[in-house]
Image (cartoon, coloured by chain):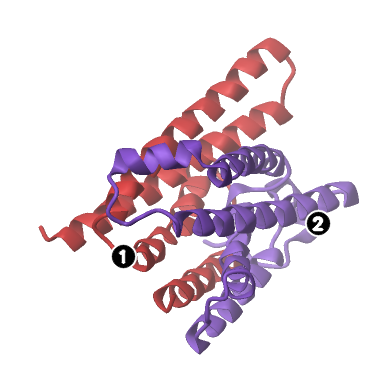
Chain colours: A purple, B red
Amino acid sequence: MFRQALRWRLAAGLFLAVALDTATQTLWKIGAADIASDVSLWQTLDVLANRTIFQVVGVLMLVKLVNWLKLLEVADLSYAKPVTSLSYVTVALASVLVLGERMRWQQVAGIAVVVAGVWLISRTSPADHDAPQAAPDAAAP
Amino acid sequence: MTGTTLGVLIVLVCTVLEGIAQVFLKLSAMSAARAKDLGAAWVRRYGWIALGVAFYLVEIGLYTIALRILTVSAAFAVSSLSFVTVTVFAAWMLHERVTRVRWLGIGLILGGVTLIVAYA
């Protein structure tokens, strides 16, 4: 049985994974916008190592890895990984709200389709050992 | 082989590396959950993490090369296939039960992500 405490841990872990991914991607975009497009790969790596914004991104990535490992202790990989695709939605929204980018209607439709996909996956059992309790869908052949 | 084909192939290799790296990270989490002998469990756990991170580093290097050939939106759209490779590797190597509903959800996510990045 997938206990209530584990469900909360799973929900908190997934929320944190999406939030950290959104923060990482948004900061990365802000930092990358200041790098000239004609610099060499080594110059790019030098910028990545020395700018504060990329150091913050590095720390966030480390926290993301730790959170991801804790998350995988309570959820299947084939459950957790697709759910984190919600970060495509939150990054797109953050691009509009924080960076002032514009969104096309096709992207809004894409967001709706991603959310529908994640909702479907959230209806399946988070982990194999929970299958008898919370798996409303049939097993694939 | 055109530059675009090469770029797409490199990103496809990246999605496979992502699938393998994620399996290693999951194996790390599983060895932590089943730990009895703490010393051996520690070696296993961090061994899997090191392997996973090593695969990620190779993936980042290859992806950086691909980004010099493809546009960001094209590379992003192809890389969303990692949702499929991760699920295939989880089913094959970790024997996770992937239901039809879960596959349908992944299909929708692929379509949605493609729409988001294609019009970015």
For label 1, the SS is: loop
Which residue shows up at 85% across the image and 52% down it? Answer: A8
Residue A88 falls in image quadrant: bottom right
Q: Could you classify mark 2 by the number of other residues whose Cα lies within 10 Å: few (under 14), some (14-19), or many (20 or more)? A: few
Q: CA distance from mark 1 to mark 2?
A: 45 Å
- Residue type, numbered disc 2: Gln
- Residue type, numbered disc 1: Thr
Marked residue chain, label 2: A
Please name whichever residue, B15 or A65, is drawn nearer the observer in this view of the structure.
A65
Please name whichever residue, A29 or A80, is drawn nearer the observer in this view of the structure.
A29
Residue at the left extreme of this rendering: B1
Where residue A60 appears, as percent x and y from the top left, is: 63, 43
Marked residue chain, label 1: B
Q: Is residue B99 left or right of residue A131?
A: left
Q: Is residue B71 left or right of residue B110?
A: left
Q: Could you classify mark 1 by the number of other residues whose Cα lies within 10 Å: few (under 14), some (14-19), or many (20 or more)? A: few
Residue annotated with mark 2: A133
Which residue shows up at 45% across the image and 56% down it? Answer: A34
For label 2, the SS is: helix
- B111 to B11, vertically: above or below: below
Which residue shows up at 70% across the image and 49% down it? Answer: A127
- B82 to B58, vertically: above or below: below
Please name whichever residue, B44 or B99, is drawn nearer the observer in this view of the structure.
B44
Numbered badge on residue A95: none
Residue annotated with mark 1: B71
